[in-house]
Amino acid sequence: MGALKKGRHLYTAALLLFLYCMSSVISKGATGDAQSGAQPSVQGTLPHFIQEPEDAYIVKSNPIKLRCRATPALQIFFKCNGEWVHQNEHFSHEYKDLNTGLKVREVMINVSRQQVEDFHGPEDYWCLCVAWSHLGTSKSRKATVRIAYLRKNFEQDPQGKEVPINGMIVLHCRPPEGVPVAEVEWLKNEELVSSQTDDNIDTRADHNLIINEARLFDSGNYTCMASNIVAKRRSTTATVTVFVNGGWSLWTEWSPCNVPCGRGVQKRSRTCTNPAPLNGGSFCEGMSVQKISCNSPCPIDGGWDEWSEWTVCSNQCERQRSRECNSPAPKHRGKMCEGNSEATENCTDGQCTQNRKLLHDVKPQSMDSTNDVALYSGLGAGIIAVGILVVAIMLYRKNQSEYGVDVIDSSALAGGFQSFNFKTTRQGNPLLLNSSLPPDLTVGRTYSTSLCFQDGADKELFDTLPDIKVKVQSSFMVYGVAEQSGFHAKAPVETFPRDLSQDYCSSIDRRKKGLLTFNGPLSIGKEQLRTSGVFGQPGGRLVLPNTGVSLLVPHGAVAENMSWEMYMVISLGEASVNTLEVCEIPLSPEVMYGPPGLDLSCPVAMTVAHCAEVDSENWNIHLKRRTQGSKWEEVMLVEDESTSCYCLMDTTSCHLLLNQPGSYVLVGEPLTQTAIKRLKLAVFGNMEGTSMNYSLRVYCVDDTPHAFQGVVAAEKSRGGQLLEEPKMLPFRANTFSLQVSIQDVPQFLWSIKPFTTCQEFSFAQVWCSNQQPLHCAFSLERYSPATTQLSCKISVRQVKGHEQILQVYTAVGKTEKELVPIFMQTDCTITSQTGPRAFKIPLSIRQRICATFDTANAKGKDWQLLAHKLHLDRNLGYFAKQQSPSAIILCLWEARHQDTADLDSLASALEEIGKIHPKSFPKDLDEEETDLNQIQACSLR
């Protein structure tokens, strides 16, 4: 190394000496030429650089070239970092410029990466050119030589953002360190973003991307791209979501009052569409439907005032009087008074004549006296006939005690026997006794008159006995017809609220206060139905078998490393009726879950069966919770929206999402006469007492599995047999009673006690049964032990309502060993399941679905779309408040489909969602397709 430096110094000294000599020779030659009078030329000027060396960057291991051109120039040498470059490293040539005719000298050197790396000076590696002419030297600019590079990691990556529409979006980017400094570009969904084509975008401020006012199409995946002559670098992708918060539309106009007369309801609504929430924007807060009570004025028919005084007799022998229709005047579409407003009569007893003619015929007085005698004779005969009839009824009642009948019935007054008819054999339900006999295919019918009364006289006869109570031999029931006549009263059919405030609410109030006597309330005991289980983080399910009641505890609701012993109870008795409002009735059993201090991270899903025909025009259905003082507080109106509770009404069940343990019940308030409560009808029978007597028992109970279990338990202990498939009867809130009658009894084979073929439940007894079964009995006696078959019909109908026919075909006289057992429990008897066994959707698939849909998506594929496809798209504000809306939606789906054995609806929903934007999000779609295949595989197991 020392020898190299010494040689370089010697080369430099020799070069300097050569240059000095050259300059001296040039100077002398110039002087001699000048003295000899030679012509001057460009040779006498200083060198001028036509091209100077430029800054350069070494890329990888490729050397760079530095060039200089000057004229006039005898020699050009490079000087790098203060030292002359060896002459052998110069590449030079000289040529003549065709435009100027001057000689131009060009010199080039190579600079390698090794040379730059070996230099350790206070500044960058540099080089310049020195050119000589006859008059002196000239120097070029310094050109720096640097090694180019670009580091891999960005100093600051852009971060994803969720921005409201019209908000400002600022994405920060600091590119990696590099030489030369990297230039920055922005990509949106792999396409270049330019501020030149969009005035709303600014990319000039310190490499940041600024969108002044966010628009929906600004949602996307943004990438910062840094590049120089060495390489290009990409930042991590930042997802920008421009969301729209929901806004309420204007309220609609108030709807007309839903009843033409009396107390009703008016509604108005608004929708969360101004704008609709998008890309995870918040749902509108508040109610979408408002209700107010209204009072439609009822029609008032006109009534006549008193007649005025007669006028003075005119010369036409007549006088007049008048009246006006003002007591009251007709209002609100009421009818005008019927009859004449003026009256005219002869004022001279018909003796006055005009134009020699009588104005009125005169009736003889003898005729008037004859009419009076006939009138009084008829009244006397009627009174005597009524007296005789009353005495006959009293004597009959005195003799009636030996029969122990269930109810006074008028069908015996109509007389007449009905023909006996056997039908061919059939195949049927194995739970039914002698189910091989054919069923009756009679469909439900609607009547407007009573089956129990053949004519008006019979009906009036029994309406005069409103408080008859008959002692019953069977200890199984007690019957009374108190206030029976009140339910036969003709009620206005045009409006229900007027009835509600009179017949309906007063009847319900008396029923709740115990003023009405039940027709056969069935005692099923006061013990509570209860189940319990211990649940941890995996969650599980509690089920009360054969009641339609269950509780689903979602996965993750219980904290990790914790467990709770949870229970669920169905409360029996009538305590819930007595504490409800007057016009409200329970539509489901009262269900309690606990313990009271239960602490869960998400709501549980409770399923409860109900007995209402759900229709918001006819019902106001409320969810209520029992307070510590055994009072009921309202949780929500089921058709309203709430963020504290969710209620989903299906045809026969209600699915609740609850956060607070306690005792809950569904109650209903009918709004119109067409409000329907479903009843389940069943007929049981068995031999009783002697072998000649057969008892038929007909049950009317709220159409819920829990209520019917009371009937099953009682009949099982009694040894009864189910004789026909239970049927459903729609029972309307029209305040009319329910009648049960037996028909088509073979008259020459069986006898039935007089006045027992038709029995009746009052409206309040049926409407306020509160899940308690009602029943009546028919006692038949066969004439001969050889009679082994019983065939008849049981008609159950509501006056001015629907009818159902229960067809009875049964064999009698068999021993107990020959009877077919009917109470076979075919329903699930499992009361508690924990972990994955309790759920239809596997945990891994559920987690992937939640991860996919809980994240806001620029294409709208979020939990709101999932809820829409699963038909759970009402009250979305409740889901929006949850930590994982998708998990709660799937929990509700599990509760709703617990009785089905497949996952088809969920698989179909995911398949439909996967078809939306098929070219977008290919990774997400692949995951969804995998989930779909797994779900379908589970549904086939």
Image (cartoon, rainbow, N blue to C red):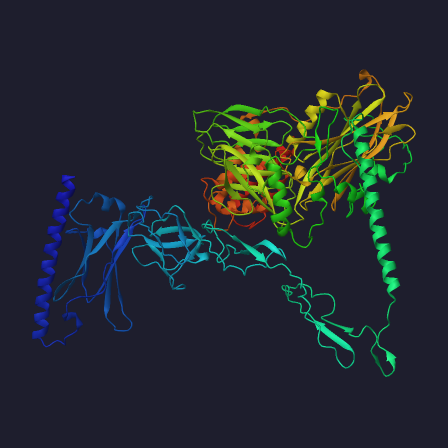
Query: From what the image shows, is residue 5 above or below residue 103?
Result: above
- Residue 374 appears in the figure: yes
Residue 897 located left or right of residue 427 = left
Viewer-proximal residue, 883 or 31? 883
Residue at 81% x, 41% y is 387
The answer to whether residue 760 is above or below residue 61 is above
Confirm whether residue 615 shows in the render.
no
Q: Position of residue 695 (x, y in %)?
A: 79, 26
| Position of residue 623 in the picture relative to residue 154 (left or right) | right
Residue at the farthest bottom position: 355
Q: Nearer the viewer, residue 640 or 329?
A: 329
Name the quadrant of the C terminus: top right
Q: In which quarter of the image is the N terminus?
A: top left
Which of 876 and 412 lies nearest the eye of the viewer?
Answer: 412
Residue 107, image x and y in percent? 24, 58
Residue 453 position within the rendered picture, expressed as x and y whole percent measured from the top left: 81, 42
Q: What is the x, y in percent for residue 95?
A: 27, 65
How many numbered markers are drawn? Answer: 0
Occupied quadrant, residue 702: top right
On screen, 732 above or below 293?
above
In this rendering, would 168 be left or right of 80? right
